[in-house]
Image: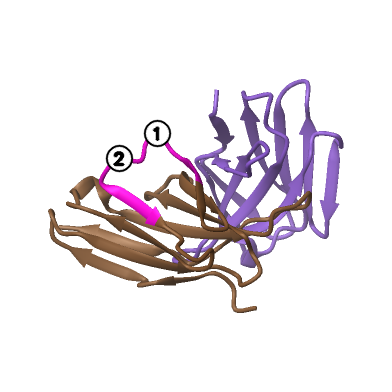
Chain colours: A purple, B brown
Amino acid sequence: QQQVKQSPQSLIVQKGGISIINCAYENTAFDYFPWYQQFPGKGPALLIAIRPDVSEKKEGRFTISFNKSAKQFSLHIMDSQPGDSATYFCAASGSARQLTFGSGTQLTVLP
Amino acid sequence: DTGVSQDPRHKITKRGQNVTFRCDPISEHNRLYWYRQTLGQGPEFLTYFQNEAQLEKSRLLSDRFSAERPKGSFSTLEIQRTEQGDSAMYLCASSLQGIDEKLFFGSGTQLSVL
C-alpha cells in the first residue's frame, strides 16, 4: 500500500520536446506529491509539488498533472533542455512527510 | 543558508566494522530525516526526528542501525557490524514543519563495505 510506481525507467527526448513521466500510488492517505531532480553525486532537489485538492500546478517549464480518482500524477517538462538531463523521482507522503519514492526515470535530452 | 551538510562524502570500510555519519541540517529546520539510496533506486526512508525526538523508524531498519539528534541540531547515524548489503548512499534531509513543508536533501555519504 505504500508503493509508488513510476514509468518509464528511461526517456530520451530531443531538445525543445516535451518530457512526460508518470506515477501511480495506492495509499489514499497520501496528501502531498513532490517531484525531485537528482544529478549524479548529488542529493535529490525539490522541483515542484502538488496537493490533491488541485488537478494541475505549473512552475516555469514544469507542470504536475494530478488525477485523484485514478491515483495517478505526472510531470511534464516543456521545451526540454540538455541541462534537464538527470534522474527524476516522484514521491508521495502523508502528514509526517515521510516520503515514499518511485524508482526513478533517467531523462536524457539530446542537443 | 549553506544547505544540508553531510560528512564524510565517502566511506570505505571492511565488513564487521562500525561506521558513523554526521548530518548538519539547515539551521532553522526542526525536522531531520535519514534515507538510504541504492544504485538505480529511489531513496528509502529510514528514520526521522522532530527536534531531538526520534518519532519514526522504518521496519526495514535493523537493530544494527541507530540514529541520534542530541540537541535538536545535528544528527548522527551509526551502523554497527557493517555488512556488504549496507553499501549504499545515505542521505539526510531537513525541513521546517508546516503546511508548505519542503524537504531539502544533502549530497549524501556513499558507503562501501568490502
B58 is within the stretch colored magenta: yes
Which residue is identified by label 2? B62
Q: Residues within 10 Å of mark 2 (few under 14, many from 20)?
A: few
Label 1 crowd bin: few (<14), some (14–19), many (20+), radius 10 Å: few
Q: Secondary structure at mark 2?
A: loop
Horizontal side of B105 relative to B37 (left or right) equals right
Residue type at mark 1 is: Arg
- Which residue is depicted at the point 85% across and 35% down? A55
Task: Tell me if residue B34 comes above or below residue B63 in the rendering.
Answer: below
Question: How many numbered discs, if any?
Answer: 2
Q: Position of residue A57 (x, y in %)?
A: 84, 46
- Residue assigned mark 1: B59
Identify whether A80 is placed above or below A25.
Answer: below
- The answer to which of B17 and A52 lies nearer the viewer is B17
**Residue at screen point 64% across, 62% down:** A84
What residue lies at 68% left-to-right and 32% top-to-bottom?
A: A30
Work out how far the residue at label 2 is from the one at label 1, CA to CA, in angstroms. Answer: 8 Å
What is the chain letter for disc 1? B
**Which picture quadrant has residue B60?**
top left
Please check the rendered image and state whether residue A14 is part of the magenta-colored stretch, yes or no.
Answer: no
Q: Quadrant of the C terminus of chain A?
A: bottom right
The region drawn magenta spans: B55-67
Q: Secondary structure at mark 1?
A: loop
Residue at the farthest bottom position: B2
- Disc number at residue B17? none
